[in-house]
Amino acid sequence: MLVSQLRDKAAMADVLTSVQRLCALARVGSVTLRADMTDAGAPASVQEALDILRQTLGVHDLEAIDISATVTDAELIKLAGILVGPPSSVHGSIIDTADALSVWNVRLHVRGVSPRPTPPGMHAVAPDVIASHQAVVRDPVPSTPSPIKPAEVVRDMRREVADAVVQADAAEVVRLLESIEEPPRFAQAASMEALVLAVEHLVDVPDDYDRVHAVLRRAGAVGARALFRQLMASTETAERRLLYDASAAHPAIADVARAHVGHPTWYVVRNAAGLLGESGSPQAIPDLSKLLRHDDQRVRAAAVVALGRIGGPAAMARLESVLTDPSSDVRNRALALVFASPESDPLADRMLMALEEESTLEFQLEMIHALAHVPTTRARNRLVSLSTMEAITADDFQLRLAAMAALAAGHRPAADAALYRLLDDPSPTIAERAAALLG
């Protein structure tokens, strides 16, 4: 509907209504739109919408689009604008376009292009689809007993690795490291310089992902440091995405990321925060909690998303302090995660009382607006409480009216009973507004 509205230059009010519906749907879980979606028993209008979707995805050579639970209205509008625009002649550049426009909570699957990491709050497209992008399936090699190499031969192989490093022959470094079977000998040959060259080979020849990543995993923490070192130095979007994927899949990456949370460069810390979230380890919660107070809001936002990815009561509790963050992006991300989480505490806890603790009316109204996009019982009860509170000041009336609008925008029909009760409110203004919202 959104794509067709933008094509037909529909009124902005209609466009925003479609955006709000998509956001509300994503808040419930995550949304995956696939190019091969069909529904033979659907009404004609749905069939028409599916045809438009398939045609739009096909024009950009997209297999699927994942929409995260933390997506924003602005991201959806920018995404739709990209989709209705003409396709680029450069295959896969739509991903770079989305990145350049800061569409972070949407994952695009382009045929034959390795996708970036799955945003928090969503399920990835079927594993077989992702696997087809990330790895090349090879014919199994018959397993034959390998002869035990004499020590002299192994020592020569270590020297060969060193020579290949001097010659900057990355492919040869990978081949030689693969051939060393004894763990102690491998550890001696797998120097940081050799592994950095292996990572460079991964970037230059993505089809060798399985081989190189196996070598990096076998190298343990040194392999993880080599990946992170290259990630810090990377300037190309596609290269960063590949290195981030490879880093997130490395078993030792959490320790390496933890060592960089105090780095003076903001984007290094942001990568570290994201990788700590990818690890899913509760041990990362203390470090991420410290980053919630980082000077750069982009780091704080990454820490919020990472805590949401780890989940659990401890991670949710840490998000309490973020509900009054100076950045609206950081606040709204935390708010969505807190209210959507089954581990959140009941209504009376301090996270839900943050609205009263915030002294600025502007922030209060903004948080109320955010609750319209969090379709949970807790959020709805909070809005009902605000819409029925005693209004003593003009600010109180604004809060009541904002809560009513949020109920109508994101919580119908469940909120209809509360709005009907407000028809009998002693305040004529409240009663009239309730009638208008009920249509």
Image: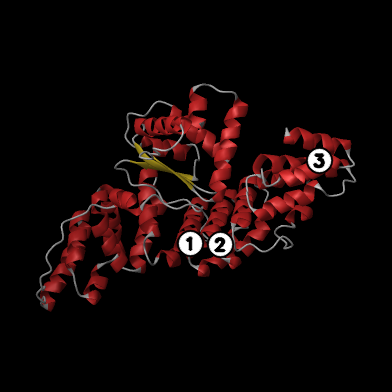
Report how far apart the C-alphas of labels 2 and 3 lie in the structure. 36 Å
Name the residue type under label 1: Leu
Judge left or right: residue 407 versus residue 60: right
SS at mark 1? Answer: helix
Q: Which mark is residue 398?
A: 3
Report how far apart the C-alphas of labels 2 and 1 lie in the structure. 8 Å
Residue highlighted by disc 2: 288
The percent coordinates of residue 360 (x first, y second) are: 78, 47
Mark 1 vs 3, N-terminal side: 1
**Could you tell me if residue 154 is visible in this image?**
yes
At label 3, counting other C-alpha atoms closer than 10 Å, the crowd grade (few under 14, some 14-19, many 20 or more) is some
Q: Which mark is residue 276?
A: 1
Vertically, is 115 above or below 94? Answer: below
Mark 2 vs 3, N-terminal side: 2
The percent coordinates of residue 131 (x first, y second) are: 31, 52
Query: Closer to us: mark 1 or mark 3?
Result: 3
Judged from this view, the residue extending furthest toward the front is 41
**Do labels 2 and 3 touch, CB within 8 Å?**
no
The percent coordinates of residue 409 (x first, y second) are: 67, 39
Name the residue type under label 3: Gln
**Could you tell me if residue 323 is visible in this image?**
no
Name the residue nearer the viewer: 366 or 244: 366
**Do labels 2 and 1 touch, CB within 8 Å?**
yes
